[in-house]
Image (cartoon, rainbow, N blue to C red):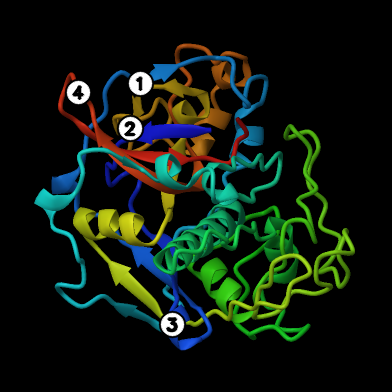
């Protein structure tokens, strides 16, 4: 579903990515996809949370801590792929005092772009990095198409959703076969993956539509996705038969080649500008046990106090696994709010709470409606 989340560095701290489509229809040029990366601000600029509501009934109800951790499939960003550069100072076209107080991409584009409002369910597969990346790219391509056609008084646009399954199965680590880029693949399948490498894979190796290779996980963690290899044929005949560096809507000849021009931004203002001008950001965050029971309000990471078992700055997964009260549903009072692992979400907007004046990001998750 969609959640409100405070941007505290301990929770949302490494990298986010977005993709733009640079279209010049008047000269007949081929559109080019340009991903962007977002590095959130320092802890001194952290935002705060209010009125977080936790509940016991969630997609994680009845799961053990170990089972919940299996769904956190995004690796910390330990490198930036070749071709990534820093944004130049002054790149942002809007300033802090020109941003709207509230903005949500779904308000303007959900009826035109399926990927904007689409909420996927990763099931028992650690596919959050792949779902967030493919949906963000799909949404950004659609948004650019809507804007380019509107500028020429046309109503048609490209609304397609790229295949998460294709990214999972065709971008396996250390597998440059099948015409791939030869990069270290972003995917270890359901065991997790890396956001920047996933975006680079989409640029260099492409992806097919979801209709061509649909996601095969079930509605719950119990129906774990099984990767059956990188398919060479589509599930539906009207879509093209194989992924490529160029993407085409089902059965049509139009192509969208993707460049490898990345840029990094590192301020809240640049992040907001990217959302306004481009589309969703893909963000890495540290996922704690409390996040799995999100119901409403604004969520922030837990206070980083020492754990029962291990003195230190945060509670680890092992702290929960070693605590007998963490094996019950709901967990007992001494079960700590431990870190389950890395998770990927999409940032689709921001806002300010009217009562408290506190700021938040609006994020889209991959745990179902």
Element type where label 4 sits in the image: loop
Tell me residue 300's x, y (percent): 33, 32
Disc 3 element: helix
Q: Is residue 90 left or right of residue 309?
A: left
Inter-mark Cα distance, 4 to 1:
15 Å
Question: Horizontally, is 92 left or right of 32 in the view?
Answer: left
4 or 3: mark nearer the eye = 3
Q: Name the mark nearer the viewer: 1 or 3.
A: 3
Q: CA distance from mark 1 to mark 3?
A: 49 Å
> Pointer 3: what residue?
26
Q: Quadrant of the C terminus?
A: top right
Cα distance between the residues tagged 4 and 2: 18 Å
Q: Earlier in the sequence, mark 4 or mark 3?
A: 3
Q: Would you name the residue on which mark 1 appears?
A: 52
**Mark 1 or 2, nearer chain start:** 1
* Front tag of 4 and 2: 4
Spot occupied by residue 188 in the image (x, y as percentages of width and height): 67, 62
Residue indicated by mark 2: 300
The residue depicted at 53 percent of the width and 84 percent of the height is 30
**Disc 4 designates what residue?**
354
Q: Does the CB distance between marks 4 and 3 fall below 8 Å?
A: no
Which residue occupies the foreground of this view, 258 or 335?
A: 258
| Circle nearer the N terminus (1, 3) | 3
* Residue 310 seen anywhere in this rendered image of the structure: no
- Disc 2 crowd, CA 10 A, few/some/many (<14, 14-19, 20+): many
Pointer 1 with pointer 2, Cβ within 8 A: yes
**Mark 3 crowd level (few <14, some 14–19, many ≥20, 10 Å Cα):** few
Q: Position of residue 37 (x, y in %)?
A: 37, 66
Q: Front-most of 140 and 254? A: 254
């Amino acid at each position: 579903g969609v959640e409100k989340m405070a941007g505290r560095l301990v929770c949302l701290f490494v990298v986010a990515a977005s993709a733009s489509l640079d279209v010049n229809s008047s000269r007949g040029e081929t559109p080019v996809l340009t991903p962007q990366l977002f590095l959130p601000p320092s802890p001194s600029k952290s935002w705060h949370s209010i009125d977080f509501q936790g509940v016991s009934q969630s997609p994680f109800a009845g799961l053990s801590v170990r089972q919940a951790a299996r769904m956190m499939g995004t690796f910390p960003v330990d490198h930036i792929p070749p071709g990534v550069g820093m944004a130049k100072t002054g790149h942002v076209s809007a300033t802090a005092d020109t941003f709207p107080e509230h903005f949500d991409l779904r308000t303007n584009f959900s009826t035109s772009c399926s990927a904007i409002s689409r909420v996927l369910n990763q099931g028992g597969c650690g596919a959050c990095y792949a779902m967030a990346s493919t949906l963000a790219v799909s949404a950004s391509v659609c948004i650019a198409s809507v804007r380019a056609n509107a500028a020429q008084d046309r109503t048609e646009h490209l609304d397609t959703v790229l295949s998460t399954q294709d990214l999972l199965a065709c971008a396996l680590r250390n597998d440059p076969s099948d015409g791939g880029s030869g990069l270290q693949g972003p995917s270890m399948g359901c065991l997790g993956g890396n956001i920047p490498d996933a975006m680079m894979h989409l640029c260099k190796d492409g992806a097919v539509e979801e209709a061509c290779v649909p996601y095969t996980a079930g509605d719950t963690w119990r129906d774990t996705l099984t990767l059956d290899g990188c398919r060479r044929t589509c599930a539906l005949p009207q879509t093209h038969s194989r992924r490529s560096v160029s993407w085409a809507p089902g059965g049509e000849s139009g192509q969208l080649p993707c460049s490898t021009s990345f840029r990094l931004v590192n301020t809240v203002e640049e992040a907001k500008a990217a959302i306004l001008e481009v589309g969703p950001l893909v963000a890495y965050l540290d996922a704690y046990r409390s996040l799995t029971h999100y119901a409403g309000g604004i969520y922030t990471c837990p206070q980083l106090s020492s754990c029962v078992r291990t003195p230190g700055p945060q509670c680890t997964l092992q702290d929960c696994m070693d605590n007998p009260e963490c094996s019950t549903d709901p967990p007992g009072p001494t079960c700590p709010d431990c870190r389950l692992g890395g998770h990927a979400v999409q940032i689709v907007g921001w806002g300010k709470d009217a009562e408290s004046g506190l700021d938040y990001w609006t994020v889209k998750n991959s745990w179902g409606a």
